[in-house]
Every structure is written in structure tokens, then in C-alpha cells.
Amino acid sequence: MAVPFLKNQSLLAPYMQLDQRGKVQAEYIWIDGDGEIRSKTTTLDSKPKAVSDLKEWNFDGSSTNQAPGDNSDIYLRPAAIYPDPFRGGDNIIVLAECWNNDGTPNKTNHRANCVKVMKQAEKEKPWFGIEQEYTLFDIDDKPYGWPKGGFPGPQGPYYCGVGAGKVYARDIIEAHYRACMYAGVEISGINAEVMPSQWEFQVGPCEGIKMGDDMVMARFLLTRVAEEWGVKVSLHPKAVPGDWNGAGCHTNYSTESMRQKGGMKAIEAAIEKLSKRHAEHIAVYGTDNDQRLTGKHETGHIGSFSSGVANRGASIRIPRHVAAQGYGYLEDRRPASNIDPYQVTDIMVTTTLLM
């Protein structure tokens, strides 16, 4: 088995305590051409008071599958600032959009259009809550904690499990939870999932563009935390073939009209609109989602649209308490774990409010 390089806290600690002499480290993060998160750090003379105080930066897009080698500069435009839980102090993480030198959004920049859509729909105050499922792997690309050369027992005891042999890597999950809180991400919970070494965290409720921003930041923080343990994070919707649950990004959604008394009418109207654009939604609901949406393992089939109260095998689930009280929200269970959250929140608002 390969031995991962792990952070040596005892060696690093003295350096992290050194005075920064008023300087601030700003780590810019962005989504690359493969949907992965990249980052690099710059030094600031002081802590910025607003996003507008930050510089526009650039990087080599030919090395990130975002530009050709003969025209490789991609520009990073700061979009949001988060406190840095790794460096602490006044240091920050900067969520940035990618722009081409001709002034157009890069092909990976789905945030730019999402901002426009959320602005158009701001009167309805669209709220989102996304449930991010993911799978942990060791450095040899084997599911973390699974028997080498074999398999754990069948699914059953792992979901929301407690105890050795039922859950794996809880220390990573707890570290990530606290890092999100420190950074100001609206993380609302965690739980072990149905497949062993599969977990979930929930972000929200967030209004408008903040949903995508906080989800991207939460994913970055998870990947960085796991890096320190020598563990890999997979967002593949079917990370382990066979009779094991896939991983999704169930997206909870509501509007001002849905949240008011009598809002069930608005929920039903939204579901009717969603039913007519099933194919368009599936197109941006994650790659390899056909491996997950099979009609088994708590999913609907990718080829058909369905809805129902408390039905986890439907495309759209109406929670039982929502149906009982007559207002609230709906849950779209189709998005895969590897979605771009800006694309998903964009199309949900476009379909239900702008068409």
C-alpha cells in the first residue's frame, strides 16, 4: 500500500504561529475544466473590507483544461470572501469566477449566468438546501476502511451509524464540519450514509447565489481537510459498482409563494413545470447520473419523471409534513453528487419562475 504524505502538525505549528507583519494570505479558488476545484495564494498588504478591494488575478488555463496553450490566460474575478480555517487570523479564501480575455465567462463559469437569473427572480426569494453525498477513498483508490481484497457486510447498519465497523473517518467529517462553521458556510448538518465510507453534509437554507457559493466552498474545505489525512474525496454518483447506493445532491427548493399558507398550489405548479423539462434538467444534473438513477437504491429512473409525497423513489419528493401543513418546499432527488450547484439552482429558478 502506498504511504500518503500527511501533514506533520508538530513540525508545522511553530511556523504557523509566526507574525505575518500585517500581511494577509488570500487563497483564490475556482472550478476548473473538469469540475474540480483549484487554488493558489497571493499576499495582500491588509485585510480587504469588501470583494471590491481584491485584485483581479489570472492563471494558466491550458493546465486546467480551460484554455488552449496559445491563448492560455484566464482571469480570476473575486466573487466572495470566506475566513480561512486552515491559516486562521485575518487570512481569507476568495471564491473567484473564471473569465476569458475577450470579456466572456469561461466555459466553466456557470456562476455568471446564475447571478443574472437570481436577480430576475429576487422578488420570490428562492431558497435552496443541498444535501451533498460523497465517498471517501484511501490513497490506493480503495473505499476507505473497507477490507483489503474484500467487501464489508451488506448495507443496513451504516446509515446514520454509530460505532466501529459501522462508520469510518468520523474525525475527517467532524473537522470539515467545524471548518465550514468557521468559514461562515451555512452548513446545517451531517450524517453517515447508506454505503459504508459514504457520508453526507447539508448546506442551507441559502437564498439565491449564496447556495452555489457556499456549496463550492464546502467542497473545497472537505477536500483540503481530507488531504491532511491522506484521504481522497469522490463525488462520483456511483463510486462503487454493484449493489451499493449511489451518491446524489438532493436539492430542496422553495419560493416565497411556496412558503406562505396555501403554498401547496405554488409547489404543485412548480412540479408541473419541472415535469415538462425533465430532459433539460437531467442534462445539467451531473455526469454519469445514469449509473445512479436506475430506479433502484432510492432513486427514480433517469428516463421518466415522477413525483409523490414522502416517496424517495420519485424524481420530486414532497415531504409528508409539507403536504400535511399545505405549504413549504419540494425536494428534487435527481441531481447527482457531482453537479455544478450554479447550473442546478439556475435551471430550477428558470423553469419554475421565469418561463
Image (cartoon, rainbow, N blue to C red):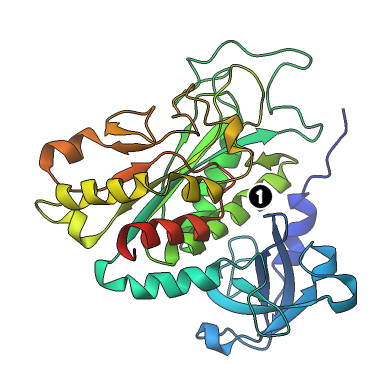
The location of residue 271, given as percent across then percent down, is 29, 46
Q: In the rendered view, would you say 7 is above or below 116? A: above
Query: Can residue 92 be seen at all in this image of the molecule?
Result: no
The residue located at (58%, 37%) in the rendering is 289
The C terminus lies in quadrant: bottom left
Left or right relative to 320: residue 61: right
| Residue positioned most to the front | 276
Relative to 254, say whether 91 is above or below.
below
Q: Quadrant of residue 311?
A: top left
Q: Is residue 5 left or right of residue 298?
A: right
Q: Nearer the viewer, residue 255 or 46?
A: 255
Q: Position of residue 67 (x, y in %)?
A: 80, 70
Check disc 1 and give the amino acid type.
Answer: Thr
Q: Is residue 138 found left or right of 198 in the rendered image?
A: right
Whether residue 54 is visible here, answered yes or no, is yes
Question: Which residue is at a point 37% across and 31% down the rendered structure image?
Answer: 314
Question: Which quarter shows the N terminus?
Answer: top right
Picture quadrant where residue 152 is located: top right
Q: Nearer the viewer, residue 111 or 70?
A: 70
The kind of secondary structure element at disc 1 is helix
Q: From the viewer's side, name the closer residue of 30 and 299.
A: 299
Q: Residue 292 at x, y = what percent?
A: 56, 31
Q: Crowding near pointer 1: few (<14 within 10 Å), some, many (20+)?
A: some
- Residue at x 52%, y 15% (from the top left corner): 155
Q: Which residue is mark 1?
A: 223
